[in-house]
Image (tube, rainbow, N blue to C red):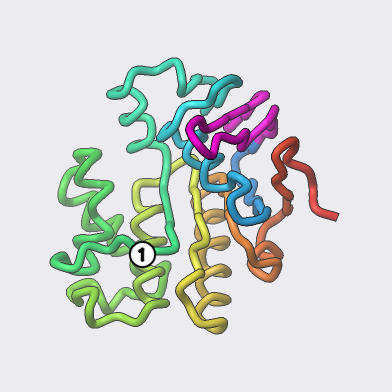
Amino acid sequence: MLSVRNLSKSFSGPRAKSVLQDISFELAAGDYIAVMGESGIGKSTLLNIIAGLDRPDSGQVLVDGVELSALGDDEATRVRRENMGFVFQAFHILPYLTVAQNVALPLVLNKIGNKMMNKRVAAMLDAVKLGDRGESLPRELSGGEMQRVAIARALVHKPRLVFADEPTGNLDPESAGDVLALLRDCVKEEGAAGILVTHSSAAAKTADRTYVLTQKSLRPAK
């Protein structure tokens, strides 16, 4: 499903540095991995390149055999909109929309009909244990509940790839544990492949495999 080949990225300017060097790995459907590494080592940069939000200096990212960096901006946006879901540390929930409306946003962007949209939103809200909160506004939710909304939104359109960048950084330990278990279970049940970026070894243990990112390699954790 995902093939990353010899990926390298550097940043220029007064504080120029090489962030990624010759990174390669592959993910199949159902894989759920964690990527750990020091702050500033390039974990978020790696996700951004894989998602087509940034371009590598060299190397390839292929999603189902399609090289993202070879696509124009419009086509790359379409691939990302249809095939990828994102969960961030900051929930990015729109405050003026209800829970159900927030979850429905990827379906609206993909022009899914109302009947299918309502069915899919209801199913995802049930999956994240918020089936009775569809008409609530974000200000009425706890932090853990808002992150569950974000997970439902990331998965509602059945993406092939799910990216989670420090998804529990703003949560208390109990809520974080619940969210991590829910994220993993939902990714697996939807048949997606997932990448969890985290500083937390406890969070990384919820993944199938853990890798450590350095400037020169992405290697399995010991």
Q: Position of residue 84 (x, y in %)?
A: 42, 41
Q: Is residue 92 magenta?
A: no
Q: Residue at x 42, y 77 (%)?
A: 144
- Quarter that holds the N terminus: top right
Query: Camera-side residue: 73 or 195?
Result: 73
Q: Quadrant of residue 79?
A: top left
Q: Quadrant of residue 39?
A: bottom right
Task: Give left or right: position of 216 versus 84.
Answer: right
Q: Residue at x 52, y 68 (%)?
A: 182
- Quarter that holds the C terminus: bottom right
Q: Where 143 sits versus 4, above or below? A: below
Q: Residue at x 53, y 26 (%)?
A: 56
Q: Position of residue 21 (x, y in %)?
A: 68, 30
What residue did someone put label 1 on?
Answer: 91
Q: Secondary structure at mark 1?
A: loop
Q: Where 13 sits versus 75, above or below? A: below
**Residue farthest top in this picture:** 70
Task: Give left or right: position of 48 versus 215.
Answer: left
Magenta stretch, main secondary structure, is strand
Q: Where 194 sits versus 13, above or below? A: below
Query: Camera-side residue: 45 or 109?
Result: 45
Q: Position of residue 89 (x, y in %)?
A: 44, 63
Query: Camera-side residue: 149 or 39?
Result: 39
Q: Is residue 9 magenta?
A: yes
Part of the protein shown in magenta: 1-26
How busy is the neighbourhood of tag 1: few (under 14 within 10 Å), some, or many (20 plus)?
A: some
Q: Residue at x 20, y 77 (%)?
A: 136
Could you tell me the amino acid type at mark 1?
Phe
Q: Where 80 sits versus 106, above or below? A: above
Q: Position of residue 123 (x, y in %)?
A: 34, 62
Q: Quadrant of residue 58?
A: top right
